[in-house]
Amino acid sequence: MNYGPNSLKRVSPAQAQTKPKHMLTLSKLLLINKLPPSNCQTTVTSSLPFSPIAMPIQLHTSTRLHHLPSHLLPRPPLLRSALLLPACRRPLLRREFCNHERFGVSNCTKRSSKNTVTVLVNAIDGQKTNEQHEKVKRAYPFHEIEPKWQHYWEENKTFRTPDEIDTSKPKFYVLDMFPYPSGAGLHVGHPLGYTATDILARFKRMQGFNVLHPMGWDAFGLPAEQYAIDTGTHPKITTLRNISRFRLQLKSLGFSYDWDREISTTEPDYYKWTQWIFLQLLKRGLAYQAEVPVNWCPALGTVLANEEVIDGVSERGGHPVIRKPMRQWMLRITAYADRLLEDLDDLDWPESIKEMQRNWIGRSEGAELDFVVINGNSQEEEKRITVYTTRPDTIFGATYLVLAPEHPFLSSLVSEAQSKHVEEYREHAFRKSDLERTELQKEKTGVFTGCYAKNPANGQAVPIWVADYVLGSYGTGAIMAVPAHDTRDFEFAMKYTIPISWVVRPDDSDCGNFEKPYSGEGSMINSSYSESGLDINGLPSKEAASRVIQWLEKSGNGKKKVNYKLRDWLFARQRYWGEPIPVIFLDDTGEGIPVPETELPLTLPELDDFTPTGTGEPPLAKADSWVITKDPLSGKPARRETNTMPQWAGSCWYYLRFMDPKNSSALVDKAQEQYWGPVDVYVGGAEHAVLHLLYARFWHKVLYDIDAVSTKEPFKCVINQGIILGEVQYTAFKDDEGNLISADSVDELAEYKQERIPEEKVMKSGDLFVLKDNPNIRLIARAHKMSKSRGNVINPDDVVFEYGADSLRLYEMFMGPLRDSKTWNTSGIDGVHRFLARSWRLVVGSASPTGSYLDGTVTVDEKPSIEQLRSLHRCIDKVTEEIEGTRFNTGISAMMEFINAAYKWDKLPRSIIEAFVLLLSPYAPHMAEELWSRLGHSNSLAYEPFPKADAAYLKESTVVLPVQINGKTRGTIQVEETCTEEEAFRLASFDTKLSKFLDGKSIRKRIYVQGKILNIVIDMPKKAKVAQQ
């Protein structure tokens, strides 16, 4: 299609404000296919949610909107590559953006053929217009194929899972950990897991499974609210805008989600059931309020989880965080600790993830024992300090006690002389997270309280210290320190000159050789005291521990105890953008009363001011008309709970809602849940190993106990995809004078200035990277996690624009094993892109000189050869096996081998190519659909039977045949299984090792067993026979 030479004109904002009579909305422009009158000129502007840029531009009336080249548009890439697409994609965009502002298109020029696009562009630079020529050459017409089939799938709801299904068929529920829709959109790391699940979903559909493959949004949370505070934009607007962008990006990659089941945690119809689950927890005593020390961030105005605090500041924003006691909602996850631990054994999860959960739950068996506090006159007081230990056998080695800085007894124990020092230490400790305090490598610090306690085993007075390596949330918040047999205690004792007493002797050592702490088991020494009646000398550690527990219980000094590291779940945030907690508090008594289930959902009020109050009161406290209410039963005045639920509340059960997303009367229909549950394959990052997966398991078990679900566990199989790191970056170092320093010439590179070196200036020297211009300068080569701050984020929109979605999908699967971390290399896409282009040309043929392709294919309706069938079925067998094993990279390799073999054939039988196209379809669905259509099929291949390998064609076509001369094996030859005697003898005659035995000899006879052996009997002179023997 040809257009006028003056392609793109800039018009002033004033001109753009003049609305001509033919002004069109986005929805109309994307749907029309008729041209406006030839004398009409249309001017419109852009103010789309994902682009703050207005684009006042003019469109010649002879230009159809859907032919406007996307690369003529300025950034951002999403606007450039997705807003103005071929006609087949228009309705999709209409649904995405039909309610947004009017937008503009420009007068443009475009000359195109099937695989070459030549564009004349007048670039907009704000000051002057320069004419540029851009030529885009494509290896195959993915720019036409992909929008076409995305539109087809959308219009025909190809991947919709019906509400009523044939339950006699097997089911396959494959789920991605649904994303938080951030303003940044996707980067190329996100599609890694999404592509893997899509391949599995497409594969299982073709195998005859009912497949559930949905997508939704974990959309509540701090980032949207913080953005609202910073900009004054309501978080709902930000969230909807971000969701629109994410949805469009995901659709552009051809993922076969059932979009009719799309959910968002921010929708009242969804969080109604999040609130309902909370009420069930409340009924069963699993939700309660308690005064607990929390990580309080004044700047963010909310409580943060330990994992959200790094080096004393918030992970988001780097704001200072302090520890302070606050009354908070808690969920009693500890009540399910044993079940959460025991049921891990039955799950098909990565062992590393299960081990992380075991460690987080941290079940241990030991004892609680009491140390009586001694006053300044060495007299016993009534106050007792209870400690928990997993090694009661070492009680005689306890030479001091340590209390956590938040221990409730601490203030009453401190002597007057030590009071100031202890208070300063506590304040410093409260600025640290639990993770920082318990880091093994950090230097141990503490302060003596000035007080002592009595060791119940030996009657000795031991000093009481306060130290931040002991947490108030673990055990009793106090420990008996045994420095001879614990590394942390030993380091602490050495630093502060506290006595050390060895009480365990290793079985292979003498007791007098101790210089370092020994934490293992052995025989007890120095462990007897007649006045207490406890004597465990000489006993093995385990027997001694049992004996001590018996003594503790008998003497009233303690008891056997099972303990957990797992703490109850802090379930409140002082934020606006979250699920309201459905509880009211009576004004007169303060009693908490649950909101009746019939009044759910309790929706968020509209607020203009989302800023934190700074006092700890949440922003919802500002909504007086919403907060002030009445008890529906008694009519008494009351106030609503103004805390909201944490972000991950909605993600604890969303997999259930996907089974029945429109149900207004139940969380999920029982029949639907019994058929679809549990999730068969759940794919996401390992960073969710503890929080999300553990909390989801907890909620699921509660729902199981109340008969809301039929399975004990939510996720049958969990797969953690690896991280895609940014492209390798090369760093050189310079001294203060600007001279380059080789990276291997100094020990501390941090002292030198860093300089990023472009890849074209780098070369590899052995295993190292050096400067091309100066090979003596070694560089540091490293790939980092993608982040905006490093500038190494790769936008998938750019990749799709240049190579197509199928190439991106294929490359991410071909980079390496799904579970491994990989380094992005944009140039690496060329390889898989060439493979797709070769596949296209193999089936369709090469482009004509004008750039166009045949409408059909170059296949023939002929019977395939044995060689072709063997090549195909080997490919079928390998691809099937590798998809089922999620080894997608080797499945792609098998298809590449097939294409290499097929290029050597004189003819392409249709039946062979059709089977290959079906194999390709889970990986590169757009191309496969197009090839399937060109092969003469009118329907999508999405539900065509996946090819099955025929074992008859998998056998090796050749065998190694032993060759004997006069009964003695002299060598082997490679022959076809069906090789004749004459052919076998001919091959043996030409073999260099065998021919020397046959040259010039008279053949008496040949004995041949097909595929087994060839024995050649020759006449030999008598002396030769002797020599041969």
Image (tube, rainbow, N blue to C red):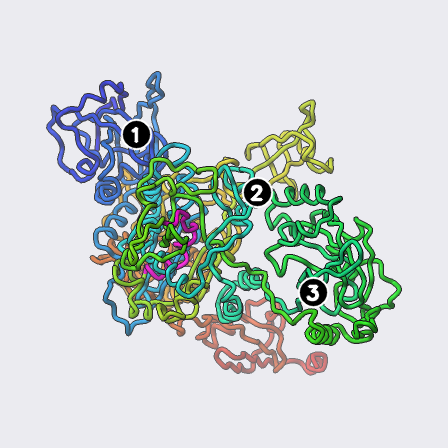
Mark 3 secondary-structure assignment? strand
- Check if mark 1's residue and mark 3's residue have beta carbons within 8 Å: no
Q: Nearer the viewer, residue 781 or 391?
A: 391
- Which picture quadrant has residue 371? bottom right
Q: Amino acid at mark 2?
A: Ile
Mark 2 secondary-structure assignment? strand
Mark 1 secondary-structure assignment? strand
Q: Bounds of the magenta span?
A: 640-658
> Residue shown at 69%/65% (left/top)?
370
Q: Amino acid at mark 3?
A: Asp
Q: Which residue is mark 2?
A: 322
| Above or below, 401 relative to 347 | above
Q: Please indicate, yes or no, whether residue 256 appears anywhere in the rendered image.
A: no
C-alpha separation, residue under disc 1 versus residue under disc 2:
59 Å
Q: Position of residue 116 (x, y in %)?
A: 31, 36
First-in-chain label (1 vs 3): 1
Q: Position of residue 509 (x, y in %)?
A: 85, 68
Q: Which residue is mark 1?
A: 119
Instruction: Tell me the tag on residue 229.
Output: none
Q: Which residue is mark 3?
A: 370
Left or right of 815: which side holds 232? left
| Above or below, 402 relative to 852 | below
Q: Position of residue 180 (x, y in %)?
A: 40, 47
Q: Nearer the viewer, residue 956 or 155?
A: 155
Label 1: how many residues lie within 10 Å, few (<14), some (14-19) or many (20+)?
many
Report if residue 654 lies within the magenta region. yes
Report if residue 458 lies within the magenta region. no
Figure quadrant of the N terminus: top left
Label 2: how many residues lie within 10 Å, few (<14), some (14-19) or many (20+)?
many
Residue mark closest to the camera, 1 vs 2: 2
> Residue shown at 40%/73% (left/top)?
951
